[in-house]
Amino acid sequence: MTKLRVLCTAVLLACASGQALADAASHAANAERFLKLAHADKLTVPVYGQVQQMFAQRFEQSGAPADKKAALESYQAKANTALDKAVGWDKLKPELVKIYTTNFTEPELKDLIAFYESPLGKKVLEKMPTLTAQSAQLTQSRLEAAVPEVNKLLADMTSELAPKDQKKK
């Protein structure tokens, strides 16, 4: 009877772990599907562009003749390779899947997928880069107005907290 219990327990555990693995695989597949819909594979495109621009600016600043443009292109290609090693989609995807499966249940991911496949969801995805840029610009412009006051408050606090013997100097 004990052997039968052990065998039944082992079979139940095997079935449960198999179901857990299937659930984890399905959860990960839904996270990948969401990331694809959200164009997460394009997240680092601006970084590549900025690095390319940095090399082009440095090339111009160096005063190198136009016939040295092949050297610029060679270094830009090497920079792309370095970026691919660090932030290429094949490097980021597994970690992003983990982030999304940790923060969203599988039903939540399915709901997100359904939303982003809807007309409104597609519009949100299309408009998001513009909205994000406009929001950042708005925040930055408003922040600039506060900088002088914040700097004065910082200076006032520094002065108030300075030891008395330093205040007299």
Image: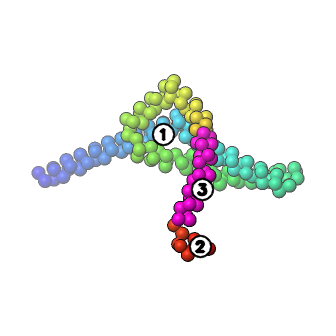
Q: Residue at x 37, y 40 (%)?
A: 105
Type of residue at label 3?
Asn
Residue picked out by circle 2:
168
Q: Residue at x 82, y 51 (%)?
A: 60
Residue drawn 62% across the image and 47% down it: 144
Q: Tag on residue 53?
A: none
Task: Identify the residue position indicated by label 1 in the image.
Answer: 32
At label 2, which amino acid type do we have? Lys
Q: Are marks 2 and 3 in contact (CB under 8 Å)?
A: no
Amino acid found under the numbered disc labelled 1: Glu
Task: Identify the element where label 2 is drawn.
Answer: loop
Cα gap from disc 2 to disc 1, whole angstroms: 63 Å
Judge whether 111 appears above or below 24 on screen.
Answer: above
- Give the magenta range: 137-160
Q: Secondary structure at mark 3?
A: helix
Answer few, some or many: residues within 10 Å of disc 3's Cα (few below 14, many 20 plus, some between 14 and 19). few
Q: Residue furthest front?
A: 168
